[in-house]
Image (cartoon, rainbow, N blue to C red):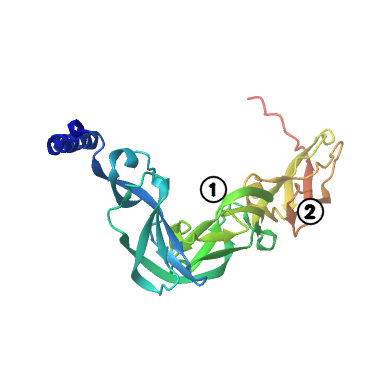
C-alpha cells in the first residue's frame, strides 16, 4: 500500500499532464470554431390586418459557435430565427429575433442570442380588380363589344395596401383578331399600375395571393367587318348576232355606275358588275330593256336594275368608187 502512495505528488502531476496532453490533441482535431448558415425566419403572431413588405424569410445569416464536429452536422434547416410579431405597427421598424437550433451537439449555440431585423409593416387588404381587354383587330375588322367575354371578370387580390393601390388588370391577345369568332384559352392576365406593367408582388409575408386564379384567363371575342360604299361601273355584253345587214352602233346604260355596299376587303376586289346578256339574235331595231342587277354575296346596292338601250342600225349603203 505504501508503494502505491509513494511519490503520489509526482504521480498526480504525471496524470494531469497526460490528461491535458490528450485533451490538447483531441481539441486540435475538433477545435472550437464558428460557421455561418442561412436560417429561416418565423414571424409569429402577425395580426390579421398587418403584412410585412420586403422582410427576410430565408437564407438569413446566423453565426453559430461550437466544436467543429458538432457544427458539421448542422444544416440550415436546423436553424430558425423566431420573431414575436404580435405587436408590430405600420412603418419601417426593427424587431428582435431569437435563434432556435434543432440537432447538433451540446456545444453548438448562436454567437449572439438575439438578432435585430428591420422590416416594413403595412395594412393587409383585399381588393377586386376588373379584368379589362386590350385587343387589336386586323384591317377590315372591328370589335363587337357585347360579344367579348373574359373569364375571370375580376381578380380578388389580398396583399399590402400600398402595393395594391391603383392596380389594374388586363388581357391582350398576341395576334390581331381576323375572324368573326375566336376563343383564346390560357391567356396571361397582366397587371399594370400608373401605366407600367408590374408582376404580382412577391415580397410580402404572408404572401400576396390571388383567389381562384393563377393570373390566367380565357377570352371569347367576336368581330365584324364594317361596310363601306363605293361606285362600281356596270357592263353589258349582248349575246347573239343582229339581223344580216344590221349592226350595233351604241350600248347605253342608265345608270352607268351603281353604289354598292359591303365589307372593305370584298369591295377592294370588285371592279365592275356584269349584267345578264341581252339576246340580240336577228334583231333589226333598237332594244331597250330593264335588267335586274345581280350582286355578289354580302354586297348590297340601292339600285336594283339598270336600263340598257342597244341601238341597232342598218348598215350604210356603200357606193362603188367610179373608175377613172
User: Looking at the picture, how far across and down is residue 106, in whole percent?
Assistant: 35, 47
Q: Which residue is mark 2?
A: 307
Dot in front, 1 or 2: 1
The label shown at residue 174 is 1
The label shown at residue 51 is none
Q: Residue at x 84, y 44 (%)?
A: 285
Evaluate whether residue 293 shows in this view. Answer: yes
Q: Nearer the viewer, residue 121 or 264?
A: 121
User: Looking at the picture, how far across and down is residue 162, in whole percent?
Assistant: 43, 70
From the image, which quarter does the N terminus lie in?
A: top left
Residue 116 lies in quadrant = bottom left
Q: Nearer the viewer, residue 109 or 273?
A: 109
Residue at the top extreme, as displayed: 323
Q: Residue at x 36, y 44 (%)?
A: 105
Evaluate whether residue 59 shows in this view. Answer: no
Estimate how packed mark 2 is, as few (under 14), some (14 to 19) or many (20 or more) residues with alpha carbons within 10 Å: some
Amino acid at each position: 500500500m505504501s508503494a502505491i502512495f509513494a511519490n503520489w505528488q509526482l504521480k498526480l502531476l504525471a496524470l494531469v499532464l497526460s490528461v491535458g496532453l490528450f485533451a490538447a490533441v483531441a481539441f486540435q482535431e475538433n477545435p472550437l470554431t464558428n460557421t455561418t448558415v442561412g436560417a429561416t425566419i418565423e414571424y409569429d403572431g402577425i395580426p390579421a390586418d398587418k403584412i410585412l413588405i420586403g422582410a427576410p424569410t430565408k437564407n438569413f445569416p446566423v453565426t453559430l459557435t461550437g466544436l467543429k464536429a458538432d457544427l458539421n452536422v448542422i444544416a440550415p434547416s436546423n436553424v430558425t430565427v423566431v420573431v414575436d410579431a404580435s405587436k408590430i405597427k405600420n412603418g419601417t421598424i426593427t424587431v428582435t429575433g431569437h435563434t432556435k437550433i434543432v440537432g447538433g451537439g451540446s456545444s453548438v449555440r448562436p454567437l449572439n442570442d438575439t438578432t435585430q431585423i428591420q422590416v416594413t409593416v403595412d395594412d393587409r387588404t383585399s381588393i377586386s380588380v376588373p379584368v379589362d381587354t386590350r385587343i387589336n383587330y386586323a384591317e377590315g375588322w372591328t370589335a363587337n363589344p357585347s360579344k367579348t367575354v373574359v373569364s375571370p371578370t375580376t381578380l380578388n387580390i389580398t396583399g399590402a395596401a400600398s402595393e395594391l393601390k391603383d392596380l389594374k388588370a388586363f388581357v391582350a391577345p398576341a395576334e390581331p383578331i381576323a375572324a368573326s369568332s375566336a376563343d383564346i384559352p390560357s391567356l396571361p392576365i397582366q397587371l399594370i399600375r400608373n401605366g407600367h406593367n408590374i408582376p404580382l408582388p412577391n415580397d410580402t409575408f404572408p404572401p400576396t395571393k390571388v383567389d381562384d386564379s393563377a393570373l390566367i384567363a380565357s377570352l371569347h371575342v367576336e368581330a365584324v367587318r364594317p361596310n363601306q360604299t363605293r361606285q362600281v361601273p356596270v357592263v353589258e355584253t349582248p349575246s347573239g348576232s343582229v339581223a344580216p345587214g344590221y349592226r350595233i352602233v351604241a350600248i347605253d346604260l342608265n345608270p352607268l355606275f351603281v353604289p354598292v355596299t359591303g365589307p372593305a376587303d370584298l369591295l377592294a376586289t370588285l371592279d365592275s358588275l356584269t349584267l345578264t346578256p341581252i339576246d340580240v339574235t336577228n334583231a333589226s331595231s333598237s332594244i331597250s330593256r330593264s335588267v335586274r342587277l345581280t350582286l355578289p354575296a354580302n354586297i348590297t346596292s340601292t339600285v336594283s336594275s339598270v336600263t340598257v338601250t342597244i341601238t341597232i342600225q342598218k348598215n350604210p349603203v356603200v357606193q362603188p368608187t367610179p373608175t377613172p
